[in-house]
Image: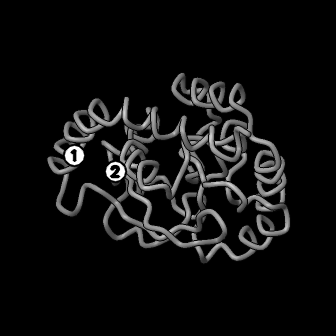
Amino acid sequence: MYKNGGKRALDIVLALLLALPALVLCLVCIVAIRLEGSGPAVFRQVRVGRNERAFVLYKLRTMSRDTGDRASHEVAASQITRSGKFLRRTKLDELPQIFNVLRGDMSFVGPRPCLPSQTELVAERRRQGAFDVRPGITGPAQLQGLDMSRPVELAAVDGRYALRPQLGQDLRHIIDTALGRGRGDAVKP
């Protein structure tokens, strides 16, 4: 029951409650990003979503403009901007994804959306059934410290989650993420 309607209802209610405070925080972050350099403050990237449908994900830009369209684990720490270090550590860079949640592209909790170019991860997630749910702003694999450089392990955790998401589990993941309990950044030191 939760997977088939309750999860989406929670997403909408939570997104509506957080939209105004998130917008204010985003505006402050955008000013900080723009003071540091030129270029767009909001980063857009095509990702793979539910049922393998492509969508545009929104984030606050944390990397230099010349980084390209690569996964975090493929990027050197030197590509992260000064403001980006803070935004990534505090997870404020994820705030624009509330818009993705409202649009129905994402959920607050689910497998973190990958790039279409991550073909091994896409194939493993397909095999494990991880595309049966919307991707999330946070997810169980992220909280366990698994990043996309370990596609088989990541897809297994994502598949187990997609099989039976639960309200209590989702609330726990949201709280753990808000408290900074994720296992760090995938960017190479």
Which quadrant of the figure contains the N terminus? top right
Q: Quadrant of residue 174?
A: top right
In the foreground, 137 or 29 = 137
Residue 145 in view, yes or no: no
State if disc 2 and disc 1 touch (CB < 8 Å): yes
Residue 15 placed where, x, y %?
Answer: 42, 37
Q: Quadrant of residue 120?
A: bottom right
Residue 50 placed where, x, y %?
Answer: 63, 63
Look at 27% across and 33% down and name the residue there. Answer: 20
Q: Which mark is residue 177?
A: none
Q: Earlier in the sequence, mark 1 or mark 2?
A: 1
The colour scheme used to paint the residues is: one colour
Q: Say what secondary structure mark 1 lies in.
A: helix
Q: Which mark is residue 30?
A: 1
Taking 116 as reference, is 148 above or below it?
above
Q: Say what secondary structure mark 2 lies in.
A: strand
Taking 32 as reference, is 152 above or below it?
below
Residue bearing the label numbered 2: 60
Q: Looking at numbered disc 1 in the image, what kind of residue is underneath it?
A: Ile
Residue 177 placed where, x, y %?
Answer: 57, 30
